[in-house]
């Protein structure tokens, strides 16, 4: 899908927040203030990326500004082996014009890196009434989680990441390291045992808000995360997030999966637009060229600024998502968001695909359906179904070859329900050019199915 898969423009704004602030003296640092209890108004909900990029002036009184992270080297500690786990517990993206770039000198060619692989969760599900041993899960997986300190020309910030292999490759969010993609800044990575390493950018993909960085002279005892399959997830599954909210490294929070395939749109650049209280999830709005749309995993585990790029684990210690954004009751760009139990993670199936392509090629192949769309609805018999209505079909596209027409309302992709234009964008973003998908659509009150060969955006 390319910019011709359009979805509406104004709406709930996702603020990039990277726990970052321009350089300031002590007198400019706000004092920690506890939030004043207030009755929340759901109509004021807005979204923000869970890694801060707020300046000192943008940091509201209700957030605690983390002091600069100073980490002293500590003795090397090895976490327990992956086999120590018997039971443990689960994981925005879309249409943006931002492409892929590669920085550093021959980073890809200098290291032969095996592909990141995924494994299915054990067949034995956690039995009802049996609590997950989060202590064991945390002890096992924590060594694979890192804190990322980014220093740019005008700002600095803290985010999180997950080690993906023994070569020192780390996955994080694009917005965590976006301030230094021009090569002018510095990235430092702190392991859970306190060791600090410089890191370079291997590749970025703004359209999925993902990036891969690599440690310079990585140690030989790195613990890599194991990735699970997000397609196996169920609503209600227990999950654990690990990251550095507000710069507090190695913070563990738990919760459950609240929803799957939640269409969430994040603005790739900060905007002064206010959120639409009638559409807090931005599912009805037209997509602009700086938006990242994801059919995300929604969780109630506490996620805050600084968690961005950190892993979301299932009860078996597998990464099933990368935490990327949160919903907030704040509607002002001058206030920093905090957790209200609505966090969102990029599904691991998409993460693994993007990470492998970035490590191998430094670029990512994204698919395009070849239609312009808006959120719409169609009537089939006595039922009215929501979907993505086609307003135009691109000449020579896979959609045209398959016979799709303007006016058709797409209601499913590979049997996944399409509820809005944003939802369709999120689904197509998961595929690569050349792959074939089954598209269910409604025309003149009749439901039809067609197979479409997706084209590459390249």
Image (spheres, rainbow, N blue to C red):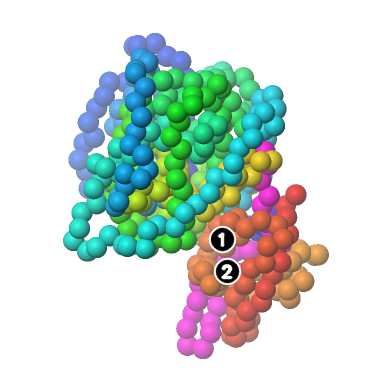
Around disc 2, counting alpha carbons within 10 Å, would you say few (fewer than 14), some (14 to 19), or many (20 or more)? many
Task: Identify which residue, 318 or 20, lies in the foreground.
Answer: 318
Q: Is residue 38 above or below residue 214?
A: below
Q: Is residue 43 visible?
A: no
Mark 2 lies on a secondary structure that is strand
Apparent side of residue 66 relative to residue 271 in the rendered image (left or right): left
Corner quadrant of residue 36:
top left
**Do tag 2 and tag 1 residues touch (Cβ < 8 Å)?**
yes
Q: What residue did someone put label 1 on?
A: 427
Furthest toward the right, the residue is 396
Task: Identify which residue, 69 or 348, lies in the foreground.
Answer: 348
Spot occupied by residue 30 in the image (x, y as percentages of width and height) = 32, 20
Q: Is residue 439 above or below residue 37?
A: below
Q: Residue at x 33, y 39 (%)?
A: 140
Q: What residue did someone put label 2 on?
A: 413
Q: Which secondary structure is most common in the magenta stretch?
A: strand
Instruction: Read off the magenta span.
Output: 362-389
Q: Is residue 401 above or below residue 132?
A: below
Spot occupied by residue 398 in the image (x, y as percentages of width and height) = 74, 66
Corner quadrant of residue 210:
top right
3D distance between C-alphas at marks 2 and 1? 7 Å
Q: Residue at x 24, y 35 (%)?
A: 35
Q: Is residue 109 visible?
A: yes
């Amino acid at each position: 899908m390319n910019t011709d898969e359009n979805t509406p423009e104004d709406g709930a704004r996702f603020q990039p927040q990277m726990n970052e602030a321009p350089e300031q003296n002590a007198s400019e640092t706000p004092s920690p203030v506890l939030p004043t209890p207030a009755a929340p108004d759901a109509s004021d909900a807005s979204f923000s990326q869970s890694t801060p990029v707020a300046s000192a002036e943008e940091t509201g009184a209700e957030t605690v500004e983390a002091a600069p992270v100073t980490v002293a080297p500590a003795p090397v500690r090895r976490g327990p082996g992956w086999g120590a786990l018997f039971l443990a517990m689960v994981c925005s993206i879309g249409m943006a014009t931002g492409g892929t770039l590669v920085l550093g000198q021959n980073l890809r060619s200098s290291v032969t890196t095996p592909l990141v692989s995924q494994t299915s969760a054990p067949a034995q599900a956690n039995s009802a009434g049996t609590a997950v041993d989060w202590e064991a899960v945390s002890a096992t997986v924590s060594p694979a989680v890192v804190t990322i300190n980014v220093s740019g020309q005008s700002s600095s910030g803290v985010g999180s990441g997950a080690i993906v292999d023994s070569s020192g490759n780390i996955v994080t969010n694009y917005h965590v390291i976006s301030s230094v993609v021009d090569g002018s800044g510095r990235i430092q990575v702190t392991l859970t045992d306190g060791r600090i390493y410089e890191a370079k950018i291997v590749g970025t993909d703004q359209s999925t808000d993902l990036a891969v960085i690599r440690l310079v002279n990585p140690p030989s005892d790195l613990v890599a995360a194991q990735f699970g399959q997000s397609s196996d997830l169920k609503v209600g599954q227990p999950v654990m997030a690990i990251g550095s909210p507000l710069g507090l490294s190695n913070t563990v929070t738990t919760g459950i999966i609240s929803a799957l395939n939640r269409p969430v749109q994040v603005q790739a650049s900060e905007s002064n637009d206010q959120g639409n209280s009638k559409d807090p999830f931005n599912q009805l709005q037209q997509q602009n060229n700086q938006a990242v749309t994801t059919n995300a995993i929604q969780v109630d585990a506490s996620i805050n600024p600084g968690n961005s790029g950190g892993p979301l684990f299932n009860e078996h210690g597998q990464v099933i998502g990368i935490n990327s954004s949160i919903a907030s009751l704040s509607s002002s760009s001058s206030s920093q968001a905090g957790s209200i139990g609505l966090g969102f993670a990029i599904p691991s199936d998409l993460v693994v695909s993007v990470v492998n392509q970035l490590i191998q090629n430094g670029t990512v192949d994204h698919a395009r359906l070849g239609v312009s769309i808006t959120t719409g609805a169609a009537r089939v018999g006595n039922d009215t179904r929501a979907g993505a209505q086609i307003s135009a079909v691109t000449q020579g596209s896979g959609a045209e070859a398959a016979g799709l027409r303007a006016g058709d309302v797409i209601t499913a992709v590979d049997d996944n329900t399409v509820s809005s234009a944003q939802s369709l964008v999120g689904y197509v973003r998961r595929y690569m050019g050349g792959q074939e998908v089954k598209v269910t659509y409604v025309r003149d009150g009749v439901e039809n199915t067609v197979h479409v060969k997706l084209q590459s955006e390249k």
